[in-house]
């Protein structure tokens, strides 16, 4: 693993002319380049080949940008997209097929069908925490649905951004897919253009900028955002398993995961035991000093590192707390004695700091969650069916996962997305294809017969028939 974490002085795409760029893509789209099954299949295969052939370069870039361990780089970035492509390729013909729906008698003879058509030219804006996955996974569905794409990787992970900008044109159709590197200026230049869909993954503040820009053109938007995803642990939970699964979900990618457990609400009588199991799990995963572990990532940049270190003042670091600015290291940390109104409980943590708060009852935990923004994920550890049902019924979150963390995202039949402040719209598997398709309703009638029933002059007989058959 490369540990220098240097940043190349990557220039933004030279002299971006966003208007010309989007115009060229629109011309390619209306010329019909992206419509056929074969084009879509070939693009997906090419993206797969890129990921497989150039895996070592992706691994290097991810390690250089944020010390991403190879196993995590494969499972959560590269491999995730490969399996998304395989899943899509196996089903694409079927998804593209028009779907027949019932047509009522008054329309007969006729055929009613749902036709999935591509939206046109779409913009995909990605963040830095899984910079390969979060750019390419939406693109899988956008290509499968037959769209032209402007892909905007995050400038924060500059090495990965530069690599994507270099490799994507080598493998994909350059007439229909463009990568634009850069920061706020470039993203805003793109946002000023008219797209047929914007797919934005990132924070809620920039989401508001995206929505404002989209409103000017009435462009539909998917927002994949974040928030504080809670973990509720009741007395019946298997504490050892809960601790391992929470620690794994929290400290993977050093906590820089949108669906990482943000904080824990644990039943008071079992809280100490739970924390001791977390201590054990951290030791088992990363050894006596996680700083030496090849399996523990680093914080992406100095700004986030400082923000996270400041959050340590929100409580007592029962586990971890050690930090080193030079290597942007922050140990897997558990905070106790955290006040609900402290900074760590106000903002999304997005790092390896886990506040553990105690509650007297499951209902107190439910009320605590409901007093805050609807989260992207909610995790519950409980062996009680009635508690599971109560929590699911009385809380709202983008997704929920019982007795595990993070695994909900690998089920491709479960659309992934937020609700309210944690996002709008969803993707993964078929829902990515649907997100980037318009479902057009098509009724096809034959010219004959053409009975006078529906036409004026209206008569009592026609009225009777209409009432019967409509
Ligand atoms: P980021 O800073 O990389 O920003 C994301 C993109 O927005 C970048 O491409 C950047 O160029 C652009 N951008 C930044 N500021 C802008 C501005 N003022 N105007 C226009 N464009 C701008 O990433 P981030 O937002 O720090 O990402 C972290 C957030 O993303 C967290 O809140 C996390 O929970 C969320 N997230 C959500 C998901 C999900 O799938 N729901 C996945 C990953 C991350």
Image: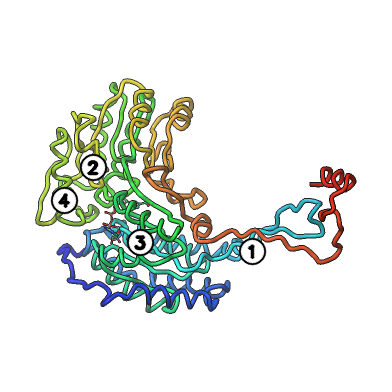
> Of marks 4 and 1, which one's residue comes earlier in the chain?
1
Sequence-first tag of 4 and 3: 3
Task: Give the numbered dot on residue 125.
Answer: 3
Question: In this figure, which residue is indicated by the disc labeled 4?
Answer: 305
Q: Quadrant of the N terminus?
A: bottom left
Q: Position of residue 85 (x, y in %)?
A: 47, 64
Q: CA distance from mark 4 to mark 1?
A: 49 Å
Q: Earlier in the sequence, mark 2 or mark 3?
A: 3
The x and y percentages for residue 267 are: 31, 24
Tell me the tag on residue 97. 1
Where does the image place residue 351, in percent across and percent down from the top left?
Answer: 23, 47
Ligand 1 is in which quadrant of the figure?
Answer: bottom left
Quarter of the view holding residue 249: top left
Residue drawn 52% across the image and 71% down it = 40
For this view, does 454 lie left or right of residue 180?
right
Front tag of 3 and 1: 3
Question: Ligand 1 within 8 A of label 3's CB?
Answer: yes
> What residue is disc 2 on?
282
Q: Specify few, some or many for label 1: CA neighbours under 10 Å numbering under 14, 14-19, or 20 or more.
A: few
Q: Nearer the viewer, residue 454 or 245?
A: 454
SS class of the residue under badge 3?
A: strand
In the image, 343 versus 122, the foreground residue is 122
Helix, strand or loop at label 2? It is helix
Compared with residue 217, is residue 225 higher up or lower down, i.e. above or below?
Answer: above
Circles 3 and 1, Cβ within 8 Å, touching? The answer is: no
Q: Is residue 392 left or right of residue 247?
A: right
């Amino acid at each position: 693993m490369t540990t220098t974490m240097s940043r190349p002085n990557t220039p933004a795409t030279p002299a971006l002319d966003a208007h010309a760029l989007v115009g060229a893509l629109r011309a390619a789209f209306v010329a019909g380049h992206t419509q056929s099954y074969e084009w879509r299949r070939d693009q997906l295969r090419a993206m797969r080949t890129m990921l497989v052939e150039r895996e070592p370069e992706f691994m290097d870039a991810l390690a250089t940008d944020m010390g991403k361990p190879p196993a995590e780089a494969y499972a959560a970035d590269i491999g995730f997209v490969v399996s998304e492509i395989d899943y899509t390729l196996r089903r694409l013909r079927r998804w593209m097929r028009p779907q027949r729906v019932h047509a009522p008698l008054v329309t007969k003879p006729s055929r009613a069908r749902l036709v999935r058509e591509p939206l046109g030219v779409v913009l995909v804006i990605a963040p830095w925490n899984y910079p390969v996955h979060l750019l390419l996974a939406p693109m899988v569905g956008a290509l499968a649905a037959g769209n032209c794409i402007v892909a905007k990787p995050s400038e924060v992970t500059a090495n990965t951004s530069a690599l994507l900008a270099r490799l994507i044109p080598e493998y994909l159709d350059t007439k229909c897919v463009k990568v634009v590197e850069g920061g706020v200026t470039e993203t805003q230049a793109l946002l000023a253009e008219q797209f047929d869909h914007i797919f934005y993954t990132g924070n809620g503040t920039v989401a508001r900028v995206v929505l404002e820009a989209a409103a000017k053109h009435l462009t539909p938007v998917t927002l994949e955002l974040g928030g504080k995803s809670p973990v509720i642990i009741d007395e019946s939970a298997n504490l050892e398993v809960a601790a391992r699964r929470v620690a794994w979900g929290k400290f993977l990618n050093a906590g820089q995961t949108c669906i990482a457990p943000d904080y824990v609400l644990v039943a008071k009588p079992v809280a100490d035991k739970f924390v001791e199991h977390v201590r054990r799990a951290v030791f088992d995963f990363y050894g006596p000093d996680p700083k030496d572990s090849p399996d523990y990532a680093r914080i992406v940049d100095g700004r986030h590192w400082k923000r996270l270190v400041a959050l340590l003042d929100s409580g007592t670091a029962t586990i971890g707390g050690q930090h080193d600015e030079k290597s942007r290291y922050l140990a897997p940390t558990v905070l106790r004695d955290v006040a609900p109104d402290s900074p760590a409980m106000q903002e999304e943590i997005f790092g390896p700091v886990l506040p553990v708060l105690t509650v007297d009852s499951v209902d107190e935990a439910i009320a605590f969650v409901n007093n805050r923004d609807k989260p992207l994920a909610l995790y519950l550890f409980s062996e009680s069916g009635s508690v599971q049902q109560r929590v699911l019924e009385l809380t709202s979150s983008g997704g929920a996962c019982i007795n595990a963390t993070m695994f909900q995202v690998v089920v491709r039949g479960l659309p992934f997305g937020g609700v309210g402040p944690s996002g709008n719209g969803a993707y993964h598997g078929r829902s990515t294809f649907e997100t980037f398709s318009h479902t057009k309703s098509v009724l096809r009638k034959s010219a004959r017969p053409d009975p006078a029933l529906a036409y004026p002059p209206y008569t009592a007989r026609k009225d009777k028939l209409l009432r019967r058959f409509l």
